[in-house]
Image (cartoon, helix red, strand yellow):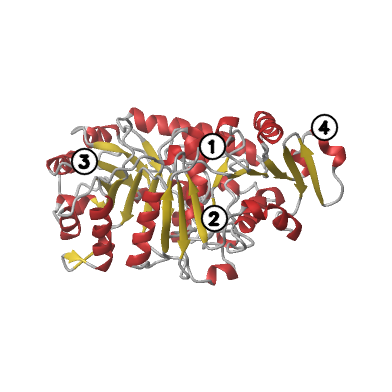
Amino acid sequence: MTDKRLQIGFNTFDTDILEHRPDFEKLLLYGADYVFCHTSPDPCGFADDCEKAAALAAALKEKGLPFIANFEFQNFAKQTVSPDGFDWSNRENGTHLLNLRPAFVQALAAEGNLIGITYDEFEHVIINRNISLWLDSKGRIDKAAFPQLATRDAFRQGEALAGQLGAYAESVRALGAPVFSGEHVFPVLYHIFARSGVIPNFKSQKECYSNLQFAVAAGAALEYGTPLWNCVDMWHKLTNPGHSATEMYHNLLFAYLAGVNRVYVESAHALVADGAPNENGREYLRFVKEYRGRQRDYDICDYRPEIGIIRYDDAYWGQNLVWARGLFGNKMIKPDRRNREWIGIIRTLTFGETGEETFTWNRIAPSSLKKHRSFCSMNALAVFDDRVGKQTLSTLKLAFLCGVRISPETLADVQTLVAENGLTAVCPARFLPGRLRTAVKGSYTEIPDGSGLWIVTDDFGSARLKKRIAPFLGCKGEIRLPFADREIRLQLGADGETFTVNGSRPTDN
């Protein structure tokens, strides 16, 4: 039987481990399944970077701990060059991307306790062209992570990225990393990452509503058969900790209830003060005591969404102003109405709780001035890409088709599910089967098809559409998560940071 227990850890730094700092040691007294470790080539007093890497793996092995090596230094450093001339981030083609020294990875893996390697905020680096370097240099350094095409076509650029990313992920694994993951700031690129062999890893309680980040990442994990990881990030803007202990606890609990495979808190420094767990640390340790090693008979592979959004993973989340670096970081590719459609769909599905332009907190707009909330209303939602198959979609009752492209194979599968499974499919006319297009009249049309229904509209926020699909949307103020043999309902608190569990009850499926 597959072990579906949630694996719980925390994020710390290699120096905390090697120097036995209290931030690390105190938390370990309460146990952890693994450590998520910020790792860098800084020798830290060792003979060289590889000796430091070997000492790190050995120190964790001695404590009986596996670890994930997380790399972030390259996102902020213009240049990192070892004494022997090895450049860790700049490439001859003019891009800026983490270069991993083979011997360094081999040293990390030498004790057999390396779970994998994570590229910190990788999607952010890609879509915003290493924006931290750009901002720090006042615009003088403007380097993409991967070579980009001379194109205005989002699909062409996205497919080029998928090939580049797949090759990069394979190269990391070939060095000795069992698995490779990114860490997502914004709710995009989960699907391109997953089909390129990169584990979806979503941040919660930070830039985006936690359950909506989950819905996008969960769709990628379901579609491509990957695990699902979750970083509960204590940063808020430039403050750490910027979230309450109660909010953090509920985000950890959400990870358990939602079938996440690995969760970790960023970071140990937000959990410890004066050598002892602070309020945040005490709530983290309470969660560890309650849920570490606790049997769970389901995980993300058992999630059974009933509402799906199907669209090409085009990297659009609502960019404007400083974030407007072009889709996929390609300055030639500007978003249009098709890219924006899914934002309106999310707003409809959340009873208007999310913004008109985005469902993250980072768009520079009046909506970003609202009080941060971790959770919003959501009923059994998952987001899929343009090539998702019938089996993955088979549990849907309501599907939205939108964006720049949906593959002919997926369109055919949706047609089958409408006709045979009773699916209700909502789409603009461009995705309607050709045999039905003569039936479209005006701005809103309902077309019965077999046992299901097509709703054709260009306005995903219209009052008429909202009224028609209301029976699918669940209850305002509630998150509903159906799994293969159970259903979980979370009643949201007024603050949007907490919830009560209304029970996990078996279903009839």
Who's the residue at 27% across and 59% down the image? 284
Mark 1 = which residue?
A: 161
- Whole-angstrom CA distance, mark 1 to mark 2, is 31 Å
Query: Is residue 193 among what the camera can see?
Result: no
- Whole-angstrom CA distance, mark 4 to mark 1, is 35 Å
Labels 3 and 2: the sequence-earlier one = 3
Going by the numbered disc 4, the residue's amino acid type is Arg
Mark 2 = which residue?
A: 378
Labels 4 and 3: the sequence-earlier one = 3
Near mark 4 (Cα within 10 A), the count class, few <14, some 14-19 or many ≥20, is few
**Which numbered mark, 1 or 2, is in the foreground of this view?**
2
Near mark 1 (Cα within 10 A), the count class, few <14, some 14-19 or many ≥20, is many
Residue 201 position in % (x across, y down)? 41, 45
Is 440 placed left or right of 79 in the picture? Answer: right
Going by the numbered disc 3, the residue's amino acid type is Ala
Near mark 3 (Cα within 10 A), the count class, few <14, some 14-19 or many ≥20, is many
Labels 4 and 2: the sequence-earlier one = 2
Q: Is residue 320 above or below residue 55?
A: below
Mark 4 = which residue?
A: 435
Mark 3 = which residue?
A: 53
